[in-house]
Amino acid sequence: MEKLEQTFFFLLLLLLEFFQLPPAAAVYDVVELGAAADGSADSAPPLLRAWDLACRSPLPAAVHVPVGRFLLSKVTFKGPCRSPVAVKIDGTLVAAASHGGAAASHGGAAASHGGAAASHGGAAAVDPIPERWIVFDGVRGLSITGGTLDGSGAALWACKAARRSCPTGATSLTLSNSEDVVVAGVKSVDSELYHVVVHGCRRVKLQSLQIAAPASSPNTDGVHVQMSTAVTIYGAAIRTGDDCVSVGPGTADLFIERVACGPGHGISIGSLGKTYEEEGVTNVTVTWAVFAGSSNGLRIKSWARPSTGFVKGVFFQHVLMWDVQNPIIVDQNYCPHAVSCPKQDSGVRISEVRFNDIRGSSATPVAVNFNCSRSSRCTDIFLQDVKLTFGDRPAKSSCSHVDGAASGVMSPPSCL
C-alpha cells in the first residue's frame, strides 16, 4: 500500500509540473490593487481589475490572491484573452451568502466596477445570474491553482431544511465555453449548490481537488460535467451531500481517476431524460476509485419518460466499495422524491457498459441492480471480477430488461 501511495504522489507531481503554464510576463496582485485581506470589503472590483489587466496582456500573465480571507460577490471573468492567464490563489475566497440578502448588499460595488471593466474591452464583468458565484467564461488557456473557495452555504441549507422561502443558491466555480483549462490544488468547502461545474468546455483537467460539505447539504454535487469534451478528473477527495461526480448530457471523452467519494451519492451518469431532445453521453472511464459510506457507488440514472438521449461506451474498473448502499446501480425509473414521477418508459438507450474488478462491501442486500427500461433495454452490459459482500450474508443481484454477460469471479452471482 505504501509503495502504491508513493507511486501515486510521484505521478501527481509529474502532472503538476507538466501542466504548469510558462512564466508570466506580469503578476497582478489583488491586494496591491485594493483588495482587503481581512474580509472587510468586497474584493470583486480589484479582482476584476487584475483579470482585466492580465487578460489584455500580450504575454502570459497571472492574477495573484495572496494569503488572507477575501470577501467576494458574484463575478464572471470573461475571455477571450490575448494570452494564457494563470490565477494563483494562496488565500481564501469567501462568498457573500445568498441567504439573508448579503449577496445583494455586496453586489453594488462589484456591479459598478463591472461597468468600468466593460469600458476596457469587456474582459471582465459581474455575473448577472445569481445561481453562479465565480465564473470563467470563454477563456482559452487558463490555470487556477491553490487556495480555498468558501461558499458560505450553511445559512442557506438551514433555510431549506426549515422549508422556508429561500434563495436558490449558487454554484461555487463554473467553467463555461472554455478550452485548455487546468484547475489544480483547489479546495472547495460549503458550496451553496454544486462545487464545480464544467459546461460547454473542451480539454479541461481538474486535479488534486479537495471538496467538502456536510452529508445533509442539499444539491451540493462535487463536480458536474455537461456538454463538454475531453475532461479529466484526477486525484480528488470529495465529501458532500449529493453526487461526488455527476455527468450530464452532451459529455464525451471523460476520464476519472483516483477519486475518493464519501459521504455523497457516488459517481453518477445522469440524471438523463429530463427532456425529450437530449444529447447523449459517450466514452466515460472511471478507474481506481474508492467509495466509503456513500449512498451509491457507480450509477447511471434516467427519468422514466421518452427521450432521444443515450449512454454508450462506459468503463468502470478497479473500484473499492466500503459500506456503500448501492455499489452498482442502473436506474431508469429515477424519481428521487417520489413526487410527480413520469411513470412511463425511459427512452434513454444504455449500451456498452463494462464493470471490471469491483470489490468491497454493500450496505444493502442488493449489491448489483440493473433496473432498465422496458421499451429501451440496457444492452451489451458486461461484468468481470465483481466481488461484493453484505456483512456476513451473501449479497444479491437484480436484473430487469437488461442483456449482457459476466465472467471471472462473480459474487453475488450474476443475473445477466
Image: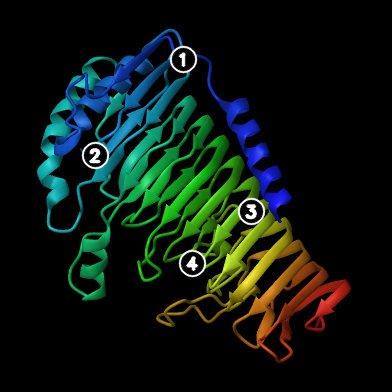
Q: Nearer the viewer, residue 2 or 328?
A: 2
Distance between mark 2 and mark 1 Cα atoms: 28 Å
Look at mark 3 in the image and give the residue it sits on. Answer: 281
Q: Amino acid at mark 2?
A: Arg
Name the quadrant containing residue 297.
bottom right
Mark 4 in CB contact with mark 2 (< 8 angstroms): no
Of badges 2 and 1, nearer the viewer stands 2
Of badges 1 and 3, nearer the viewer stands 1
Mark 3 in CB contact with mark 2 (< 8 angstroms): no
Q: Which mark, by number, is residue 69? A: 2
Sooner in the amino-acid sequence: mark 4 or mark 2: 2
Look at mark 1 in the image and give the residue it sits on. Answer: 83
Sooner in the amino-acid sequence: mark 4 or mark 3: 4
Q: Amino acid at mark 4?
A: Gly
Residue 380 x, y percent position in the rendering: 81, 66
Of badges 4 and 3, nearer the viewer stands 4
Look at mark 4 in the image and give the residue it sits on. Answer: 264
Callout 4 environment at 10 Å: few (<14), some (14 to 19), or many (20+)?
A: many
Callout 3 environment at 10 Å: few (<14), some (14 to 19), or many (20+)?
A: many
Name the residue at the bottom extreme: 393
- Left or right, residue 275 beside residue 125: right
**Looking at the image, is 148 positioned above or below residue 160?**
above
Q: Please name the residue shown 23% across and 37% down the image.
A: 70
Mark 1 in CB contact with mark 3 (< 8 angstroms): no
Element at label 2: strand
